[in-house]
Amino acid sequence: MQSEFDEIRPFGEGEVKQAVESLLADRQFSRMLKGFVPWMPGWMRNGLIRLAFVGVNTPLQFQLRFIKPVLRRILRKCSTGYTFAYTGIEPGPERYTFISNHRDIVLDSAILDLMLHENHFPTTCEIAIGDNLLIYPWIKTLVKLNKAFTVKRGLSPRELLESSQRMSRYMHYAIQEKHENIWIAQREGRAKDSSDQTQESLLKMFAMAGKGEIVDRLKELNLVPLSISYEYDPCDYLKAQEFQMKRDNPSFKKTKQDDLDNMKTGIFGQKGRIHYEAMPCINSWLDEVAELPKTEIYVEIARRIDQQIHAGYQLFPGNYVALDMLNGTSNYTDKYTEEDEAFLKERILTMYANPVINKQKAIQ
């Protein structure tokens, strides 16, 4: 593997054993494991983990042995089912870059991996993750075991250019030479208001590497717009809280603990129904925009990707209730029942009432 990517790439074959040993030696990781099995002595936990890793030599094997069963258990407890639809792509030799709206920090890519495996795609995805989320060394090790590559954040303009060029080269390398799929969000961070828009700067980064004109370079990545729909967003109250904090203090920034709270709530909170829809690869229409001026080509590609992602949404009763409540109308009453409306109102009120309830308990 090319050494220029060592700083950002996931672990490769032959590096898994050392990564596991570093996890077991990490005190914070050990405390996290203790929370799952508090009755088990540390030496026994570590011994069982080492034993479980026998025969696991690659990140894909790690995903299939560990991540897949854990994720299925989470989905059984925290959702009412998940579905996957795809048109224009096939579980064959082709590799794809899935570019999606961003609903959950951890689960967006993990659920996609599970769906690809269950639908007989030959491999899962390498995952683009911002280094701002790699709060502790054990988290960085764990995500690299889970086929994640790192997106650098908080860089100077010069550093950002160099980092973007390297990441573009890596993505082309991963698709064309490593024969891996890729998952990446359509924008930096989640759309807190769920209005999903593709960043043109992301498309420009994609086209920094590769051969030929802009369209030719993008074609090398086999970009597939992916729509992610949750019936309920378990982080809705955290997002609302962040909006309020930024309203009252424009310079507000989340802490490491805030990020951890978002990750934990997103994983273990109730999500209702989950639907993923992979739309046709954009290679089918990229030639139509090839003759546009360079100043317009990325704008048009982003617009069309957004159109595909939005068309792939699965809408639930709560979406229609929310729109009618927001507009003070009853245009969509055929899409939901009175029970749906009452439930959503109760959830919204509970979301804002819980801080009062918890504080009252704390000071009694």
Image: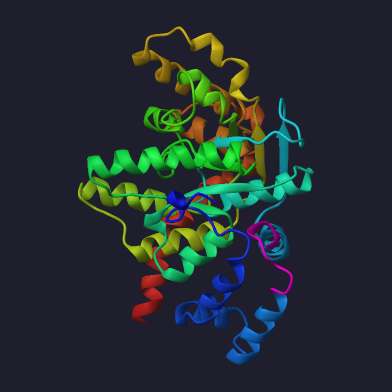
Image: 234 above or below 274: below
Name the one closer to the observer, 281 or 332. Answer: 281
Image: 184 above or below 346: above
Residue 25 located left or right of residue 17: left
Name the one closer to the observer, 140 or 171. Answer: 171
Res 70 → quadrant: bottom right
Determine the residue positioned at 42% across, 37% down. 187
Location of residue 56 in the rendering, given as x and y in whole percent from the top left corner = 70, 67
Location of residue 137 in the rendering, given as x and y in whole percent from the top left corner = 43, 69
Determine the residue positioned at 46% across, 33% down. 196
Residue furthest top as drawn: 291
Location of residue 97 in the rendering, given as x and y in whole percent from the top left corner = 58, 36
Would residue 58 be counted in the magenta stretch?
A: yes
Q: Which residues are magenta?
A: 53-61
Residue 293 located left or right of residue 226: left
Image: 53 above or below 132: below
Determine the residue positioned at 55% across, 70% down. 19
Location of residue 252 in the rendering, given as x and y in whole percent from the top left corner = 24, 53
Would residue 77 be counted in the magenta stretch?
A: no
Residue furthest front as drawn: 2
Q: How many marks?
A: 0
Determine the residue positioned at 25% across, 45% down. 247
Dominant secondary structure, magenta: loop
Task: Report whether residue 276 is seen.
Answer: yes
Task: Report whether residue 227 is seen.
Answer: no
